[in-house]
Structure formats: C-alpha cells, structure tokens
Image (cartoon, rainbow, N blue to C red):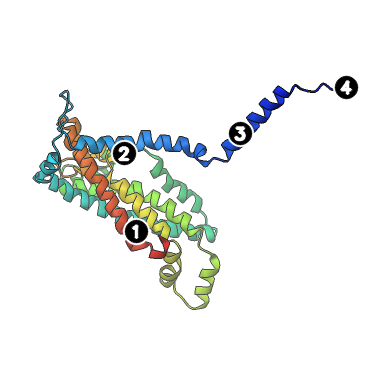
C-alpha cells in the first residue's frame, strides 16, 4: 500500500503556521494586550477626560468650553457648602468604615468558630449575611426607606407604636437622617467585610491556636497575638476597599434620602452629581471627582504606612 507525499509547499505552510503560533505563545505582551486595551479605553481615558474637564468651564447646557485653569477648584474650595458636604462625608465614611470592620470581624469570628466547632446554623448565618451584599445599593435604599419612613406603614415606627413609643423622625430629622444613612450603609458593607475577613481566618493554621492555648493564652490574647498578625494583610485590603466604596457611595443614599433633609446627608458623591446634572456644571463636577480620587489615593497610602511593614513593599 503506497502513501502519497504532500507537496513541499504544504509542509512549508504548516511549518510557518506552527512557528508563528509558538512565537505567539512565547510573547507575553500578546496575552495581556486585551487587558491593556481595556484599561486604556475604559479606565485611563475616562480618568484623563475627567482631569481635563476639571480645568474647563464646561456646561451641560452650552456648546464648547474654555480652559480656565484651577478656577473650578478654587470656586469649590471657597464654597461654604462644599466644606459642609466634606464634613458630612468624613462623618459618614469614618463611622461606616469603623462599624463595618468591627461588625464584620465579629461576624467572621463567630462564623469561623461555628464552622470549626460544627455548630448548627453556621452556614445559614453566612448565607443570610451574604445576601445583604448582593442586593443593589438602590434597592437597599428603598428597603430601608420603607422600614424607616415616618408613616403608619413604616415598619420600625409601626413596631415602636405597638410598643407604646412615639414615632421617631428617622428621615426628616437631619441628625437622625445621617444616622439612618450610616446604619443602612453599615448593614450593606458589613457583609463584604465579613466575606474578606472570614476568608482570611481560614488561612490561619490551627496549630497556632493550639500552641497559644497550651501557653495559657486567653481568647483576647489569641486574637491579638495570633489572629490579627496572621490576617493583617487581609484587614488592610478590606479597609482600602470599604473606604473607597463608602466614599463613592451614591445609589443607596440617593434612593434613601436624596441627600436630605436639606443637605444633611449630601455626601461628596451626591454633591458631584448635583453639580453635574442639576446645576449642569460639568467642570466643577469633574473637579469634585478628581478631588475624591486624590482623597482615595491619600487614604490608601496612609493605610499602607500603618498596616504594611517596609519589607513588604
């Protein structure tokens, strides 16, 4: 039985294609090129445009724009309302981040203990907490508004009335509105902190706890000298992410209070939105966005100095 030999031209084509594919595989740039293109088009370019627009007097209702330098920044920084929003934002971010990290740690430790000891309800508790994170922010705002509204059908006030208490102005009183906003954001963000911290706790070797118990360490001592050092990097990442998420929170507050009553819950993210889409000043809105970006970078740098040793950089 005879076999026909392929022409040399076919062999050359196959060899050329094979060689090209091998060279393609050996070139790392070709594999990361799509990711680089994505970052350039959808991350860096919008960032560049925001910075560029912040140096203009661009209006949403006018054609064309002129470069005005840092005039938009100076107008914002000289505005008393901006500093009021900045103070509200600081209170909102600090309170939310502290509560999220503390409550997230408590829940993570409780669930981790329940899983290790095989206690009933550990898995269902974890699922219940996780459900808060997967709900969109605008839906969370609506749900909390239904619970806290000062009408007879408000869930919380209805329960208070049944217990003989007076109606509480959760959303119409400025101080209570800010507290309610912090509470809703904490309820949402605690789930994310629990997820990350629980994942970090799974990486702590059990023999370290056993050794600490043998040495007579109590629960708080084990947490301070064993748990925290082992999950320090996870705590750092969690702090950075929840700080950025909280500072940029918009949808949940918009659906819960709309920034009111008055400007009591108008954080910088809402202030930026109102500047751009109610007062139609895109230049100043972009300037606020750039300043928020700078704050995020500064906070990340501070966290790095506090939580990461020099040899870990």
Residue 139 in view of the camera: no
Residue with the mark numbered 4: 2
Q: Residues within 10 Å of mark 2 (few under 14, many from 20)?
A: some
- Give the foreground label among 2 and 4: 4
How far apart marks 2 and 4 lie (CA) works out to 79 Å
Position in image of residue 294 (x %, y %): 25, 48
Secondary element under disc 4, as helix, strand or loop, is loop
Residue 184: mark: none
Q: Earlier in the sequence, mark 4 or mark 3?
A: 4
Mark toward the viewer: 4 or 1: 4
Q: Residue 300 location in percent, x, y?
A: 32, 54
Instruction: Tell me which numbered mark, 3 or 2, is placed earlier along the sequence.
Output: 3
Residue shown at 49% from the left, 54% from the top? 122
Q: Nearer the viewer, residue 9 or 240?
A: 9
Q: Quadrant of residue 134?
A: top left
Q: Nearer the viewer, residue 202 or 286?
A: 286
- Sequence order check, earlier mark of 3 and 1: 3
Disc 4 + disc 3, Cβ < 8 Å = no
Circles 3 and 1 in contact, beta carbons < 8 Å: no
- Spatial CA distance of label 4 from label 3 is 32 Å
Work out whether mark 4 precedes mark 1 in sequence or the reverse, and give the earlier one: 4
Instruction: Check disc 1 and report the residue beneath it.
Output: 304
**Which residue position is annotated with label 2?**
143
Callouts 4 and 1 close, C-beta under 8 Å? no
Which numbered circle lies on residue 21?
A: 3
> How far across and how far down the image is residue 1, in percent?
90, 22
Q: Is residue 282 left or right of residue 156?
A: left
């Amino acid at each position: 039985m005879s076999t026909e030999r392929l022409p040399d031209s076919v062999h050359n084509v196959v060899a050329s294609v094979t060689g090209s594919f091998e060279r393609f595989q050996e070139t790392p740039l070709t594999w990361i090129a799509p990711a680089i293109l994505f970052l350039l088009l959808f991350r860096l370019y919008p960032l560049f445009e925001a910075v560029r627009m912040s140096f203009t007097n661009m209006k949403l209702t006018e054609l064309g724009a002129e470069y005005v330098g840092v005039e938009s920044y100076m107008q914002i920084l000289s505005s008393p309302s901006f500093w009021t929003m900045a103070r509200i934002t600081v209170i909102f971010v600090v309170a939310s981040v502290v509560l999220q990290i503390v409550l997230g740690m408590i829940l993570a430790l409780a669930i981790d203990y329940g899983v290790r000891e095989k206690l009933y309800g550990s898995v269902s508790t974890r699922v219940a907490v996780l459900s808060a994170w997967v709900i969109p922010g605008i839906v969370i705002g609506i749900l909390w508004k239904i619970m806290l509204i000062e009408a007879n059908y408000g869930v919380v006030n209805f329960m208070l009335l049944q217990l003989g208490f007076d109606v509480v102005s959760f959303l119409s009183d400025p101080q209570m509105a800010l507290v309610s906003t912090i509470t809703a954001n904490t309820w949402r963000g605690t789930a994310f902190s629990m997820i990350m911290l629980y994942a970090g706790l799974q990486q702590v070797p059990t023999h370290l706890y056993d050794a600490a118990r043998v040495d007579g360490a109590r629960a708080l001592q084990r947490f301070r000298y064993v748990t925290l050092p082992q999950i320090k990097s996870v705590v750092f990442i969690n702090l950075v992410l929840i700080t950025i998420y909280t500072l940029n929170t918009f949808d949940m507050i918009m659906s819960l209070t709309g920034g009111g009553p008055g400007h009591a819950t108008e954080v910088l993210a809402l202030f930026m939105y109102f500047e751009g889409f109610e007062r139609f000043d895109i230049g100043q809105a972009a300037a606020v966005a750039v300043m928020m970006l700078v704050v995020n970078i500064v906070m990340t740098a501070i966290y790095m100095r506090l939580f990461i040793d020099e040899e870990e950089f």
